[in-house]
Image (cartoon, coloured by chain):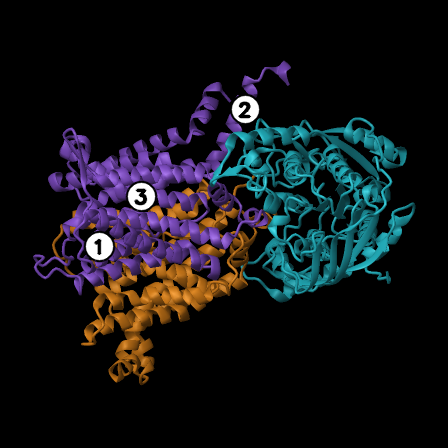
Chain colours: A purple, B cyan, C orange
Amino acid sequence: MSRGRATGAMLLSNQGVVSVAVVALGVLLSVGLLAVTGADLGRALPQLAAGAVGSSAALEETLRQSIPIMLIGLGVAIGLRAGLFNIGGEGQLYVAALAAVVVAQALPLTVPLLAVPLIVMAGAAAGALWGGAAGWMRARLGMNEVITTILLNEIGFLLASYAVHGWLRDQAGGGYPWSHKIAVAFRLPVVRVGPLTIPLGVAIALAAALLIGILLERSHLGFRLRTLGDNPDAAAYSGSSVAGLTVLAMGLAGLLAGLAGVVELAGNQERLSDFFSPGYGFTAIAVALVGNARAGGVVIAALLFGALRAGASSMERIAQVPAATSLVAQAIIILLLVVARSDRLSGWIRRRRALAEALDTPEEAE
Amino acid sequence: MWKRYAATVALSGASFSVRRGEIHALLGENGAGKTTLMNVLDGITRPDEGEIFWRGERVSIDSPQTAARLGIGMVHQHDRLVPAMTVAENFALALGQSFWVDPAQARGLIRATVEKYGGHVDPDAVVRELSVGQRQWVSLLRALARDVSLLVLDEPTTTLTPQERDTLFATLRQSRASGLSVVFITHKLDEVFAVCDRVTVMRDGSEVATLDVAATTPGDLVALMVGRRVEEGFDRVPMAPGTVLLSVSGVASAGERLKVHDIDLEVRAGEIVGVAGVDGNGQREVIEVITGVRRPEAGHVVFRDGTSGWSHDKAMHVARIPEDRHRHGLALGLALWENIHLGRWKQRGLVRRGIVDRRRALAACAESMKRFDVRASGPTQPAGELSGGNQQKAVLARELADAPDLVVAMNPCRGLDIAASRFVLEQLLAVRNGGGGVLFVSYDLDEILAIADRVLVMASGRIAGEVLPGPGVADRIGALMGGEVVGR
Amino acid sequence: MSVLIDLLVSTAFLASAVRLAVPLILAGAGEVISERAGVLNIGLEGMMLMGAFTGVVGADLTGNPWIGALAAALGGIAVAAIHGYVVITWAGNQIVSGLALNLGSLGLTTYLSRQIWDTGQQQSVAHFTPVHIPGLSNIPFLGPVLFQQSPFFYFAVAVAIGLGVVLFRSRQGLAWRGSGEDPAALDSVGVSVAATRWKALLVCGALAGIGGGAISLAQLYTFIENMTGGRGYIALALVIVTRWNPMWAIGVALFFGATDAVAVRVQALDVAIPYQISLMLPFVLTLIVYGFAARRGRPPAALGRPWMKS
């Protein structure tokens, strides 16, 4: 029982330190896996770094990749704090983008000041509906939101896929099943900062993070959501409506995922396809977990994972290492995180901390 | 024996020995280490240091299976039966030898054990549907069924009626005659004198003394348990019952195991109404109806303001101290200050435009902590890290801070040591002395008799009778708890 | 409409419904055991996918479909072992671990399949063909539906029934149920909760792996990226509908197999139902059936709760 081990426990009880260590270890293990399976690391690794931060174009790509996972991750974080698990980001994103495309095609608007808020609201509303439905099914029918959101993911994706293969399909799209590009008035403007072209989505995501941070840590609603997450019986006993809060939390999570869908559509891809999301909804879960379900943590984790995604896709293009390996890396990071926050390890940490505090307390003070 | 947990030392060098054919009481307050010591003996808890000698040989007991092989059996305070299984399946799980379960064999074993030790057990009953007392008896039979030579009973009487308790004692005496040794964990003195031969008193994780019961007195034992003699009695101001604060009439509700019906009771200003009874006779259901956790199927609950049924806007006037502070009382993962304002942010004016005024809330919490003697490292410490006594004080601090005129409390002293229990009872009495009313449910008759102005007794889902405290009244209440019904 | 009705009572349709039900019976029965023991296994989809992959690898390397089936079981067990290490040994969060295993299995099988077979269209590997049960397979109507199936079907039915008997009539079954209902009670009678949960989880992994193998070795004869396509998720919901009884997994899986078969058949017919909508059907029906069943059963009381001995 040395002082050194107690200090180690102190470090491990700092969630930020844990998250950084876990991500680093996860990336290392994934690289090891690549090496074992015979990838050309000498070419792949520099490309990973270059694709993430190597140039202004790479930085822009990192930012672009960070926006949707930041927004969805914030929603997942709200759910986690309220004791709910929103796995449905992927489906919520697809139905939101679908709703936004439909609105953009139906309304011949030319004034961005009118068109952009409209499309954003349409997407957010669709996402909120898709997420809120899972909340309702849990509150009223007792259905586990993990399973319902997974099923709603498949349904939401297939709806969008059906639309872009059918009535929304751009027949002149070079054989790709995708929709027409949305009209210029509906697209999000970009901001130029020095050599960088920053999408407006970055501002939207950061503003959302600030609002969600205040909501969770400072607002009355946030206290009630967190009470629900910690102990639903105590929440009901202290006068909260468990059903109402459940629908609200899942609806908010869906709204943020919807926002991600519409921002990705109007600020990046400009049209819907059935390869619109390369798994943003699932990466966002890793983002929320690594960020410890805190708004600030989600922002940092989203930038980190955005960089990983940007680097991995450039690695795939240039060094022919499939981006599927980034899924493996995410899985490894999440698993390490689960162990780092497991009951057994946290119990050990608590005991060591108590010991460390006892060592720091002089005898006569007791 | 030594055992340390995160911040507490559960056992600090405790030693203990038991002889063949004796009933040995292990006496001590809650938290003295009695149960931990016996869990070590049963192989459930691994000690940090220490050794066990069994029939003169040093043994290492690493699991309950090893303990069972040696002939040691334990009946836990909260029974360790699987509620979703039948009695026979629970027997087979613990005692079966072959891979396949033979239901007929399990039934036969149960019948044989019942014949030997008494009681009434249906082998095919699902444990979930049994009363707490029946479950306790099944646990006891299951332990005896495997020919133990040392039986450890952890507070076995808390869920039994006085009559069932006497049956248990008779069974124990009979088994002692045939050479069985019994360790009887308790914090009740009368049980020590009723059935035990020797007594070991524990305090703060180690043994204080081992004495022959015949050569000691209750006063000596109390002094050993708490380390000093406690002052007896409470300050009570004479009060004339005032206006009706709570009126329950004709309430009926179906709980998990029994149906509560025809519940009528009133609580007036300036009185403490005690509700006595064995666990599982409908007290929980009645309190849940009053506090809004359960919807009644019939009847009314009317509060002072004339409104019927619980609604949360009454929280500032009606304090609720729930039976299970971990389930309804506290959100253990949240900070102490968040728990102290739980459900009352708005009523206490701590919310402005949806945002919580953190500084004022923290200051208010610090003040409550001082007033109710809540010991914590600070308002931001998670509630789950507090000791049981301080958690209960935190619940009191939340519920009593706004000067309520009615308190509804269920087993508020459960699991607390003598000093903390006394503090809780004093707070309830202070509400009464200040002109408020208290509805006080407890499974511990001594607590009720200590502070109640009148006592209702519940049995089998209804109110069996009403008794005024006074000398010799305990027997009368015991008879009512056992099911005798009198008109009121 | 009459075309559709003719279709639904045709032996070809029913036989394909039974065939499509096989992976769901296996994975569903396995998940019942795991959940009965208290371990929630969201990673079922990943175990199936891994089994589908290792099954094809095994069959491809040896040219023997039986070794392929064995490899499929081992693939599922490998994923289950990671889950067990995280949630039993370390008492970590069961939902999150399962999700990660789904992601990781998808990534790993995709990556490895491209490494092994390049990206070109892969040839059929050694696979299972239907076994005609002598005598029974000639029964009109029932014969072609039930007794001309791949060995996976007979295995699945036997396993589901066998596990039902074990669960309710053996001490191992009592231990599994105890571990999921009240692990403290199980521990106090001297049975190791961790060992009990490990056994259940590995059984589940093996069955899910074989279920995946049933897709790759008896339906498509090759590996395709993400070829399980969400069947693991349907099996998860199916478990709730069975009220945690492995024998019921047969009936419920047949129902979902039928909806799957409708989706397949509709594409073949010239009915004006788009491809995506017919693919959506099993998921929508799962959601609806789950909605009706959700409040009717009582999940194991300690499901999803980590257990640590003090």
Q: Position of residue B323 (x, y in %)?
A: 67, 47
Q: Position of residue B481 (x, y in %)?
A: 81, 55
Q: Which of the chains bears the disc numbered 1?
A: C
**Residue at screen point 21% across, 69% down:** C274
Residue at which label 1 appears: C225
Label 1 with label 3: CB-CB less than 8 Å:
no
Res A252 label: none
Mark 3 Cα-neighbour bin, 10 Å: few <14, some 14–19, many ≥20: many
Q: Nearer the viewer, residue C141 or C275?
A: C275
Three-letter amino acid code at the position of disc 3: Leu
Q: Are marks 1 and 3 on the same chain?
A: no
Mark 1 Cα-neighbour bin, 10 Å: few <14, some 14–19, many ≥20: some
Q: Are marks 3 and 2 on the same chain?
A: yes
Q: CA distance from mark 3 to mark 2?
A: 40 Å
Three-letter amino acid code at the position of disc 1: Glu
User: Does residue B75 appear in this view?
Assistant: no
Q: Which of the chains bears the disc numbered 2?
A: A
Q: Nearer the viewer, residue A277 or C302?
A: A277
Relative side of C264 to C18, left or right:
left
Query: Which SS class for mark 2?
Result: helix
The picture quadrant where one finds residue C207 is bottom left
Earlier in the chain: of badge 3 and badge 2, it is 3
Res A355 label: 2
Query: Which SS class for mark 3?
Result: helix
Q: CA distance from mark 1 to mark 3?
A: 29 Å
Q: Are marks 1 and 2 on the same chain?
A: no
Q: CA distance from mark 1 to mark 2?
A: 51 Å
